[in-house]
Amino acid sequence: MAGKLGNGEGTIRKRSDGRWEVRIVLEGGVRKSLYAKTRQEASRLLAQARRDREDGVTAFTDRQTVEQYLTTWLEGTKASTTEASSYVRIQFDVHRCVIPRLGTYQLRKLTGQQVQAFYGQMLGEGYAASTVRHMHTTLHDALKNAVKLGLVHCNVADLVDPPRVLQREMDVLTEQQVRTLIDTVKGDRLEALIVLALATGLRAGELMALQWRDVNLDSGVLQVRRTLKRMSHGYGFGRAKTKRSHRPIALPTMVTEALQKHYAAQLEERAQAKDAWQDLDLVFCNQIGQRMSKHIFQGYSWFGRVLRAAGLPRVRFHDLRHTAATLLLARGVNVKVVSEMLGHSSISVTLSLYAHVLPHMQRDAAATMDDLLRG
């Protein structure tokens, strides 16, 4: 390394072990080394360290607090590597929950006991176990990065037990209840929405983001490409979260007929709206073409009124997805086919969610094998 480094300056060099080392001089002439796998990552670390110094943040020093580190981690690492919708949730976890309760501790002195007490405090304040567990995931990710940078010796989040989340029991409609729901919603402006949800198991966000360009009524196939996501400015449409979420789905004839009827009705609404119509190409929209509110799916709104009119139990709109999967599996449809239709990340997710259907399937398989063996 050439020359003597001044405060806040830094250099990058490749080590013999293949890693890239960032050397920076802090206040008082203290030298600090950070490590990265690539030259590009090392450059980002050096640039962030210089920005921190300019902003007065004591990053990379022994006196750095949890708040200072998490702020730097959010604005640097997470902002450039995380999808916008996920970043909004992480920001909420950090600024509204973690920093107010752990922010004043020195990063290097943070203990597992303090983190465990933080989880207990959140639960005591009424936060759901799933929310606290999500905060654990965020904090663990942040501290893992701190270990990589050499700021702490170990990830104290590894030393604690996040709360166990009990899986909510599914409310699944029976075949007869499904037919009752379809009969009740006939003639409703959003009849096709219910029919499509029951037939395909599409998520509410996927239904709200669906565009006509993704629906081929002639071939009876739709393509899932987008979903509704929480953005920094509210809600917006974005790419489906995982590769498996991008999927084609074959449509039953009843669904294509419902969509054709829906399309004709939408053309009439468009003609009546005239210049007020906003052409977003949405399959399901309000009377002037805009995105519908998510509130229509909640129990006290449109969906709840439909259920009450049908005399059906109060279920979530998401339970229509569970209903579709359960009924298909109970009718003997291959688990892999159902998994692909739902857009699950793997078949194991489908198996774990719908294990309650498997004993019935296994009995059918045993009966089939019995017939085979008996000839």
Image (spheres, rainbow, N blue to C red):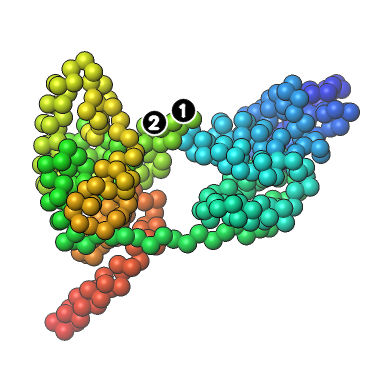
Question: The residue under label 2 is which amino acid type?
Answer: Gly
Left or right: where 155 falls relative to 260: right
Q: Residues within 10 Å of mark 2 (few under 14, many from 20)?
A: some
The image quadrant where one finds the C terminus is bottom left
Q: Residue at x 26, y 21 (%)?
A: 278
Left or right: where 8 falls relative to 193: right
Q: Quadrant of residue 336?
A: bottom left
Left or right: where 141 falls relative to 190: right
Q: Residue at x 47, y 62 (%)?
A: 166
Query: Marks 2 and 1, Cα distance to the nearest angstrom?
Result: 8 Å
- Asked if residue 316 is positioned above or below residue 290 in the image, the reply reads below
- Please state the horizontal and vertical placement of residue 197, each as a whole percent of the image: 24, 47
The image quadrant where one finds the N terminus is top right
* Residue that label 2 marks: 236
Instruction: In this rendered view, identify the residue nearer to me: 156 or 309.
Output: 309
- 2 and 1 marks in contact (CB < 8 Å): yes
* Residue that label 1 marks: 233
Q: Quadrant of residue 241?
A: top left
Question: The residue under label 1 is which amino acid type?
Answer: His
Count of marks, rendered view: 2
Give SS at disc 2: strand
Q: Residue furthest bottom?
A: 374
Q: Residue at x 81, y 37 (%)?
A: 63
